[in-house]
């Protein structure tokens, strides 16, 4: 049994439909437009006007021919399949839309046109595309960073250690020249390490603890042992992204210096919140820093660490862990938060 719906109910349903609905006669004159269609077009009354006014300026001269072609071969189908369709609003702005056509007879030929605003969908697609491109870029940066660290930095570390071993048996003149080479290698390592750090963290960042654990794991390859790491207090929550960047880079630098100079078998890192400052100490049981302050301050490694701390109003010092030579070293790096 088929029940015919109340015509008033049908009219009400179409009037309140979320998509725009037009009924257009064979001459292209609009005989009906629902509420949503008026909102999409940005006009109060479309009835009695030509549907061509809703077509963008660039397409309008040819739209009449397209209408005639559809009238000759009417069919229920989407309009302009595969094309980017636009609705010209009253204010001249073109709105991206999907349009479906349905012919019907009621004494003469009419076309029911359903119009859907797809601007939100296109924006979501655009954002998804941008996000995918950013993820691909991050993955490529991380790959380059790994290659730099695992290949270039490891070769530089090896070169530096080899040259440093040669210094012990060289003449004073040769040793002096080799020390210059070692300083140059240190500087290059610092620059490459900064590049690696930047590439590895430019896209997204995880928990600070995991990031620091990654630094420890990388340093252990060069040290020959795994340094310990301890965080005290709400370190992650008080640091800005900029301070975090410099602190992690400084930790890399400090552990690299231990590997190159300390001849240590143990090292530990403590990062703590103390008196409105983030403090990092890197301690080892190696040979300790030179007693000559000028030699300590002249190296590129400590200069880089001091510069990173000073950029945030902080300090960086290097001293003996305990009194006396050979007692190991402790590097203290601190910035206010």
Image (cartoon, rainbow, N blue to C red):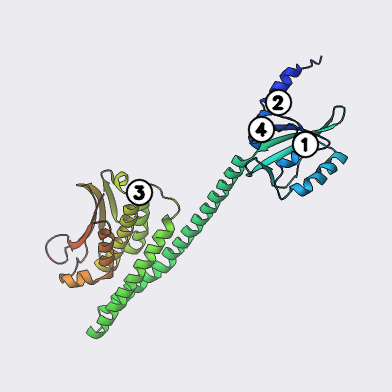
Residue at the far left in the pictured view: 323
Does the residue at mark 2 contact the one at mark 3 (Cβ under 8 Å)? no
x, y (%) of residue 126?
Answer: 58, 47
Element on which disc 1 rests: strand
Q: CA distance from mark 3 to mark 4?
A: 54 Å
Sequence-earlier tag: 3 or 4: 4
Circle 3 residue: 208
x, y (%) of residue 169?
Answer: 25, 81
Circle 2 residue: 14
Element on which disc 4 rests: helix
Question: Crowding near pointer 4: few (<14 within 10 Å), some, many (20+)?
Answer: some
Q: CA distance from mark 4 to mark 1?
A: 18 Å
Q: Is residue 114 visible?
A: yes
Sequence-earlier tag: 4 or 1: 4
From the image, which quarter does the N terminus lie in?
Answer: top right
Circle 1 residue: 101
x, y (%) of residue 279?
Answer: 23, 52
Query: Which residue: 28% across, 59% down?
Result: 311
């Amino acid at each position: 049994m088929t029940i015919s719906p109340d015509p008033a109910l049908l009219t009400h349903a179409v009037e309140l439909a979320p998509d725009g609905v037009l009924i257009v006669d064979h001459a292209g004159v609009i005989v009906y437009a629902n509420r949503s269609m008026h909102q999409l077009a940005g006009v109060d009354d479309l009835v009695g006007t030509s549907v061509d006014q809703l077509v963008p300026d660039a397409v309008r001269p040819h739209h009449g021919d397209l209408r005639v072609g559809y009238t000759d071969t009417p069919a229920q189908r989407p309009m302009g399949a595969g094309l980017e369709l636009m609705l010209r609003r009253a204010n001249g702005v073109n709105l991206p839309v999907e349009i479906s056509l349905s012919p019907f007879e009621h004494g003469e030929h009419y076309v029911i046109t359903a119009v859907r605003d797809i601007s939100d969908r296109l924006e979501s697609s655009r954002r998804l595309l941008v996000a995918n491109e950013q993820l691909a870029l991050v993955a490529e940066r991380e790959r380059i960073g790994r290659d730099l660290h695992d290949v270039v930095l490891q070769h530089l570390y090896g070169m530096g250690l080899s040259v440093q071993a040669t210094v012990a048996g060289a003449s004073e003149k040769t040793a002096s020249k080799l020390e210059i080479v070692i300083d140059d290698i240190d500087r290059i390592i610092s620059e490459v390490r900064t590049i690696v750090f930047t590439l590895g963290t430019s896209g997204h960042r995880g928990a600070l603890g995991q990031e620091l654990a990654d630094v420890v794991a990388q340093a252990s390859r060069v040290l020959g042992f795994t340094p310990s790491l301890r965080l005290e207090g709400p370190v992650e929550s008080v640091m800005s992204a900029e301070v975090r960047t410099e602190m992690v880079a400084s930790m890399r630098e400090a552990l690299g210096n231990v590997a190159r100079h300390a001849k240590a078998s143990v090292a530990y890192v403590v990062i703590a919140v103390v008196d409105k400052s983030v403090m990092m100490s890197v301690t080892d049981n190696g040979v300790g820093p030179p007693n000559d302050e000028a030699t300590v301050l002249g190296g590129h490694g400590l200069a880089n660490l001091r510069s990173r701390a000073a950029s945030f109003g902080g300090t960086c010092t290097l001293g003996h862990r305990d009194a006396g030579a050979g007692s190991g070293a402790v590097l203290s790096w601190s910035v206010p938060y």
